[in-house]
């Protein structure tokens, strides 16, 4: 029944997607992040739902009469350059077949990221996309949190099988990136019941991160908690959630969880910590000998390369760091592009925060920029210990950073009316908005 229900729903959305490509982007995001087919038992499990909706969305994108233009910025340029660069390095990849398969997967992600850049051009559409991400990953987080509570934390929480976030560490990363987006929606939801529900969602998602038994996830969760307290307005609600998660971790998680987290004090001495460091050394040595092209996608699958560039006695494994993996696979130019993409995304949000701090009608943009930065912090921190260099959510959020700044810049360039502190409407010209932005 689940298979039939999913098929009816997805195929039922196709006529609407053909009329509005933005709906296709939302359905693609839902399928890609939540992976509902992994909760089925029959034909739906392995059916290429994401690919189907992507193709339909691209057809709709091509035939739709609505305005479609990719706004070029530092972020969109870096996205294009990193796509081209990874294509170039793939021609010289050590593990050719695996590299081409991986590049095709990465290219499909970036194509839909460019669709995001072209279609998500209003506040309403940004808000809708954030809601879809939160629904997709937040429901998994709430489910994982309830499971952790009911089982007393004795079992690991994992993501949907055969997905980007199937691994416990990857799932913890995705949940940590989702919590700040929940906070943004909580700040801008008109209904109290929704705000309360999002508060409980943040709490249970945090508990799910604990239930993954991911040490990198715990570090990311702690940093996300601090960043939320630093960057969020109305911090009392955030503080209550943080305290509740901390209280649960300290008093209710079982001894085996505590023992695993205690290994953070001597992480390099654990088996997983040692093999991670070995993979970093492998990538660094490889990049030093092949500084321009690196080894190409999935070079870590080559036993010959491990024998040549890995430390003595190293155990071949995936490179558990977004930075070292990018360095080893795409060389120093690829790593520079990756850092430039992260920096450009962060800078876009910083521009938004500066220009909207004193603009009451743009408070939504200020909050969204703040929470996108917190999500980027989660990715950059937890990603330092995970092979998630090509994680689809991270690239879509970076695109949102750029789109938000473009939207705000266009809004500030137009005359508009806002309410002053007494509630009276005041006419604001573009010049006065710029002045306010420079004073902020």
Image (tube, helix red, strand yellow):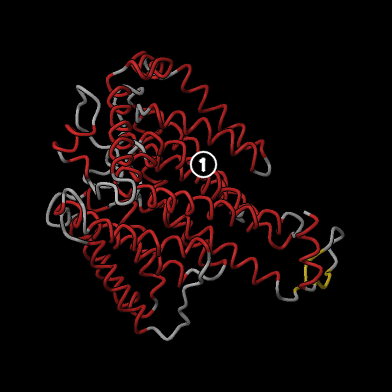
Image quarter where the N terminus lies is: bottom left
Residue at 40% x, 30% y is 216
Residue 193 appears in the rendering? no
Residue 363 is left or right of residue 307, and the answer is right
Rendered location of residue 272, percent (x, y) = 29, 24
- Where 194 sits versus 433, above or below? above
Q: Nearer the viewer, residue 319 or 36?
A: 319
Residue 393 appears in the rendering? yes
Residue 290 is left or right of residue 261, and the answer is left
Residue 247 is left or right of residue 428, and the answer is left
Rendered location of residue 369, percent (x, y) = 59, 53
* Residue where numbered disc 1 is placed: 377
- Where 214 sits versus 318, above or below? above
Q: Quadrant of residue 231?
A: top right
Rendered location of residue 337, percent (x, y) = 43, 54
Q: Nearer the viewer, residue 168 or 263?
A: 263
Residue at 64% x, 72% y is 410
Residue 156 is left or right of residue 244, and the answer is left
């Amino acid at each position: 029944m689940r298979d039939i229900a999913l098929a009816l729903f997805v195929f039922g959305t196709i006529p609407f997607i053909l009329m509005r490509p933005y709906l296709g982007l939302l359905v693609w995001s839902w399928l890609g992040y939540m992976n509902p087919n992994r909760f089925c038992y029959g034909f739906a499990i392995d059916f290429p739902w994401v690919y189907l909706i992507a193709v339909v969305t691209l057809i709709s994108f091509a035939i739709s009469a609505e305005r479609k233009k990719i706004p070029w910025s530092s972020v969109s340029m870096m996205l294009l350059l990193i796509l081209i660069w990874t294509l170039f390095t793939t021609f010289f990849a050590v593990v050719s077949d695996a590299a081409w398969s991986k590049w095709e997967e990465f290219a499909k992600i970036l194509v839909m990221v460019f669709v995001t850049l072209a279609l998500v051009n209003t506040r309403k559409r940004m808000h809708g996309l954030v809601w879809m991400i939160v629904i997709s990953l937040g429901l998994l987080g709430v489910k994982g949190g309830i499971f952790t509570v009911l089982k007393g934390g004795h079992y690991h929480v994992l993501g949907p099988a055969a997905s980007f976030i199937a691994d416990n560490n990857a799932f913890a990363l995705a949940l940590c990136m989702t919590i700040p987006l929940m906070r943004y929606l909580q700040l801008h939801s008109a209904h109290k019941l929704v705000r309360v529900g999002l508060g409980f969602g943040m709490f249970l998602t945090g508990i799910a991160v604990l239930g993954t038994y991911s040490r990198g996830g715990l570090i990311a969760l702690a940093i996300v908690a601090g960043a939320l307290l630093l960057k969020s307005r109305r911090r009392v609600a955030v503080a209550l959630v943080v305290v509740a998660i901390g209280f649960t971790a300290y008093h209710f998680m079982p001894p085996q969880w505590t023992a695993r987290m205690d290994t953070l004090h001597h992480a390099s001495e654990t088996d997983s910590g040692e093999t991670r460091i070995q993979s970093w050394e492998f990538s660094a040595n490889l990049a030093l000998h092949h500084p321009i092209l690196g080894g190409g996608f999935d070079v870590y699958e080559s036993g010959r390369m491990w024998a040549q560039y890995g430390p003595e006695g190293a155990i071949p494994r995936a490179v558990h760091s977004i930075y070292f993996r990018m360095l080893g696979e795409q060389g120093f130019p690829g790593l520079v592009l990756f850092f430039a993409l992260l920096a450009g995304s962060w800078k876009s949000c910083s521009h938004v925060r500066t220009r909207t701090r004193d603009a009451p009608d743009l408070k939504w943009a200020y909050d969204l920029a703040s929470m996108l930065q917190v999500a980027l912090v989660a990715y950059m921190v937890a990603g330092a210990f995970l092979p998630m260099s090509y994680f689809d959510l991270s690239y879509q959020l970076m695109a949102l950073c750029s789109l938000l700044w473009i939207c705000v810049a266009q809004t500030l360039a137009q005359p508009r009316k806002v309410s002053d502190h007494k509630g009276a409407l005041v006419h604001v010209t573009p010049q006065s908005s710029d002045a306010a932005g420079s004073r902020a």
